[in-house]
């Protein structure tokens, strides 16, 4: 048999210490976890013990399903289905009346999806008899966290339908996992975060010395981390979704001597951070926060004579990867390639802050 060098999925998630999988990683493993269930369905087999300890990780980070000791041919059995001890992943119909339904594995897979998103163990620390009581009498499910995007939350809930006839098929699940893109989920998470009144500011502040003194902008990088510009501390700070500090980028390393320059707005493209300052430059940093270069974002036809009279505030990246910069004082939106080459400008007649 193949040796899966990295152990079980459960042991891997336990070692994350409160961190979460990157969005891309979440989708890759969710699809890989679903594929063997699809294969078993085609073979008319129910695995009957789908759970994170039964997924193993190969040396190249591929999930593989194991432990087929409880597997059964797909059929509806009532009052005579044997139970395993994996209560946290067991569907309520088996716990209540011993019914093994054709969609039994779907319920368990919904719990695995929840584990992949939260990196937590379902019903952690609860005695087995209490887990059974909560599921059977209170119809309790693992708590879906607030940061879980609605499409994924809805997918989990559909897998956990008490009426097993109402659960989606594994083909429908794979279709949804394929149609919901990583970028859509990152955007949803970003919108959810921005919509709140900076509720996690104090939590962020406790992660490192000092606090978020003057947050000017927030975005999400390609790994699903929160990226915040702190103008007062002159840093771009990167946090995991649960508020754990990951990286601080010192923006003073590229400041022009003699010019009062503050970081203002940040955007991320392909692991590269683009940052406007309060003068005329866009500064470029790599994924590790190392300074690369800077380029003037004032287009030639309306360049100010004095850089100090120019304010760059808004910054975003379009679908082509081009950089759009808001020149607040000059009232232009200036479009550039990522190397700084100017493409064209739009006269707005308003101050385009963002």
Image (cartoon, helix red, strand yellow):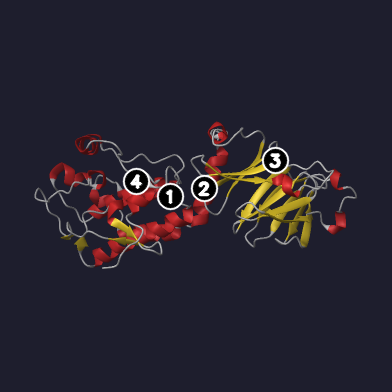
Label drawn at residue 157: 4
Gap between marks 2 and 4 measured at Cα: 18 Å
The residue lying toward the viewer, choosing from 242 and 99, is: 242
Mark 2 and mark 1 residues within 8 Å of each other at the beta carbon? yes
The residue positioned farthest toward the left in the image shown:
80
Q: Position of residue 269 (x, y in %)?
A: 62, 57
**Image vertical order of residue 340 relative to residue 91, above or below:** below
Q: Position of residue 320 (x, y in %)?
A: 64, 62
104 horizontally vs 317: left or right: left
To which quarter of the image does residue 319 belong? bottom right
Crowdedness near tag 4: few (<14), some (14–19) or many (≥20) residues, C-alpha within 10 Å:
some
Mark 1 and mark 4 residues within 8 Å of each other at the beta carbon? no
Label drawn at residue 188: 2
On the question of residue 171 being in view, the answer is: no
Q: Position of residue 152 (x, y in %)?
A: 41, 49
Mark 2 and mark 3 residues within 8 Å of each other at the beta carbon? no
């Amino acid at each position: 048999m193949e040796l899966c060098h990295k152990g079980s999925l459960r042991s891997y998630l336990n070692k994350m210490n409160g961190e979460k999988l990157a969005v891309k990683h979440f989708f890759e493993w969710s699809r890989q976890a679903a594929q063997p269930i699809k294969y078993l369905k085609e073979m008319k087999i129910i695995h009957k013990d789908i759970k994170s300890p039964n997924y193993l990780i190969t040396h190249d980070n591929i999930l593989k399903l194991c432990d087929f000791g409880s597997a059964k041919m797909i059929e509806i059995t009532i009052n005579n289905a044997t139970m395993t001890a994996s209560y946290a992943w067991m569907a309520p119909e088996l716990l209540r009346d011993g019914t093994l339904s054709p969609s039994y594995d779907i319920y368990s897979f919904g719990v695995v999806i929840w584990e992949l998103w939260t990196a937590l163990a379902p019903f952690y620390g609860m005695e087995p008899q209490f887990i059974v009581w909560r599921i059977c009498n209170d119809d309790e499910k693992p708590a879906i966290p607030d940061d879980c995007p609605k499409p994924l939350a809805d997918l989990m809930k559909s897998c956990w339908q008490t009426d097993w006839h109402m659960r989606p098929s594994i083909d429908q699940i794979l279709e949804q996992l394929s149609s919901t893109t990583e970028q859509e989920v990152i955007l949803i998470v970003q919108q959810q975060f921005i919509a709140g009144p900076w509720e996690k500011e104090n939590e962020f502040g406790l992660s490192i010395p000092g606090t978020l003194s003057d947050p000017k902008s927030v975005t999400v990088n390609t790994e699903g981390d929160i990226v915040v510009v702190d103008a007062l501390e002159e840093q771009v700070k990167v946090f995991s979704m649960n508020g754990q500090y990951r990286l601080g980028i010192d923006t003073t390393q590229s400041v022009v001597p003699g010019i009062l320059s503050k970081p203002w707005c940040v955007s991320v493209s392909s692991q590269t951070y683009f940052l406007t300052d309060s003068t005329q430059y866009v500064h470029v940093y790599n994924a590790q926060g190392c300074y690369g270069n800077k380029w003037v974002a004032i287009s030639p036809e309306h360049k100010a004579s004095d850089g100090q009279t120019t304010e760059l505030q808004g910054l975003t990246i379009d679908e082509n990867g081009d950089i759009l910069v808001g020149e607040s004082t000059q009232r232009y939106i200036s479009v550039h390639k990522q190397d700084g080459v100017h493409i064209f400008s739009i006269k707005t007649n308003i101050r385009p802050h963002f």
